[in-house]
């Protein structure tokens, strides 16, 4: 963990994404907090502990989700841009974004802490509500990033450590 109240450093996220995207240059910088609710559509990934409790939430704008998903399997950047214009991910990009968020579960796992796994990845086209939204409004910690991928577009990613229930 990084400084108090922050989940990850830009370097930690950059390393995971650079390794995953076959050494494509990925720049990650801290950014202003993503507003809640984020502008729709967006990609929501939830992570749970082995005991089934929700623990982390990642929110990516569609621009970053499309770009990273396309870069993973060398889909041309114009396909990612078309996905953003359409406001949804194709089936292939959806599979890729799930794989990216699955690999990112490793960012939360430490030898001396509970184990966390990816629970669900969805493209949201409406405002969040219910217990998840309430937990995100009062996170234990959060990190907000601007991410750019060489040859593709940039976007925002926010990560919340939450308590639900």
Image: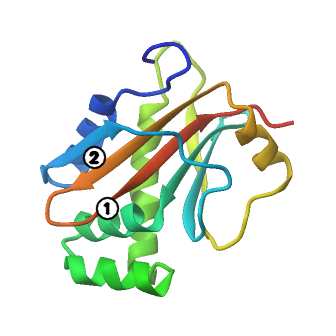
Instruction: Report the quarter where the N terminus lies.
Output: top left
Residue 9, numbered circle: none
Residue 68, numbered circle: 1
Q: Residue at x 60, y 23 (%)?
A: 114
Q: Residue at x 13, y 49 (%)?
A: 25
Residue 147 rendering spot, x and y as whole percentages: 31, 49
Q: Give the mark nearer the N terminus: 1 vs 2.
A: 2
Instruction: Report the quarter where the C terminus lies.
Output: top right
Residue 86 rendering spot, x and y as whole percentages: 46, 87
Discs 1, 2 touching: Cβ within 8 Å: yes
Question: Which residue does the numbered mark 2 point to in the structure image?
Answer: 17
Q: Residues within 10 Å of mark 1 (few under 14, many from 20)?
A: many
| Depth order, front residue of 96/148 | 148
Is 149 placed above or below 123 here?
above
Q: CA distance from mark 1 to mark 2?
A: 8 Å
Q: Residue at x 22, y 56 (%)?
A: 149
Q: Quadrant of residue 10?
A: top left
Q: Residue at x 73, y 64 (%)?
A: 127
């Amino acid at each position: 963990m990084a400084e108090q109240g922050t989940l990850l450093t830009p370097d930690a996220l950059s390393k995971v994404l650079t390794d995953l995207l076959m050494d494509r240059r990925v720049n990650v910088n801290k950014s202003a907090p993503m507003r809640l609710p984020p502008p729709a559509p967006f990609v929501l990934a939830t992570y749970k502990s082995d005991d089934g409790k929700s623990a982390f939430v990642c929110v990516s704008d569609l621009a970053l989700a499309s770009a990273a998903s396309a870069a993973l399997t060398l889909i041309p950047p114009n396909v990612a841009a078309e996905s953003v214009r359409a406001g949804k991910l194709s089936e292939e990009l959806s599979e890729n974004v799930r794989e990216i968020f699955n690999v990112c579960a490793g960012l939360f796992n430490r030898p001396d802490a509970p184990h966390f796994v990816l629970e669900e990845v969805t493209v949201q086209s409406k405002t969040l509500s219910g217990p998840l939204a309430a937990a995100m409004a009062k996170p234990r910690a959060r990190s907000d990033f601007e991410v750019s991928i060489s040859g593709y577009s940039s976007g925002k990613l926010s990560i919340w450590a939450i308590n639900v229930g």
